[in-house]
Amino acid sequence: MTEIEAEFIQREENKEVYAALKKIPERDQRIIFLKYSGYSYREIAESLNLEEASIGTYLVRAKKKLKIALDEIKG
């Protein structure tokens, strides 16, 4: 695979992930975004006014919803 082909595939995958993110609830979008932007569970909890102890559970659920949405997009 050439570098151009790899870049094209990556862009297409990014489009699919972005489309899937738009299909899940806003709170789930924000939790995923904050976590993958390097925020700690404590920082995410403070930002979203949630209990720190619950962030792991919220994140797992959000990722499951994202996977379902992504699977729907991919067919």
Image (tube, rainbow, N blue to C red):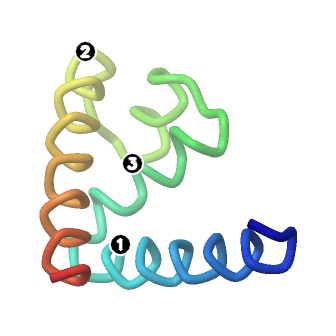
* Disc with the residue nearer the chain's start (3 vs 2): 3
What residue type is disc 3 on? Answer: Ile
Give the residue pinned by disc 1. Answer: 21
Give the residue pinned by disc 3. Answer: 31
* Quadrant in which the N terminus appears: bottom right
- Residue 74 picture quarter: bottom left
Q: Is residue 25 visible?
A: no
When the figure is inspected, residue 72 is found, relative to residue 71, above or below; the finding is below
Instruction: Please provide percent x and percent y for residue 49.
Output: 34, 42
Give the foreground label among 1 and 2: 1
Number of residues whose C-alpha sits closer than 10 Å to that of mark 1, classed few (under 14), some (14–19) or many (20 or more): many
Instruction: Please provide percent x and percent y for residue 30.
Output: 42, 58
* In contact (CB < 8 Å): disc 3 and disc 1: no
Residue 40: mark in rendering: none
Q: Is residue 39 visible?
A: yes
The answer to whether 17 appears left or right of 14 in the picture is: left
Q: Dot 1 lies on which element?
A: helix
The mark tally for this picture is 3
Q: Front-most of 3 and 18? A: 3
What residue type is disc 2 on? Answer: Ala
- Distance CA(mark 1)–CA(mark 2): 24 Å
Residue appearing at x 17%, y 27% in the figure = 57
- Distance CA(mark 3)–CA(mark 2): 14 Å
Q: Front-most of 58 and 65? A: 65
Q: Dot 3 lies on which element?
A: helix
Number of residues whose C-alpha sits closer than 10 Å to that of mark 3, classed few (under 14), some (14–19) or many (20 or more): many
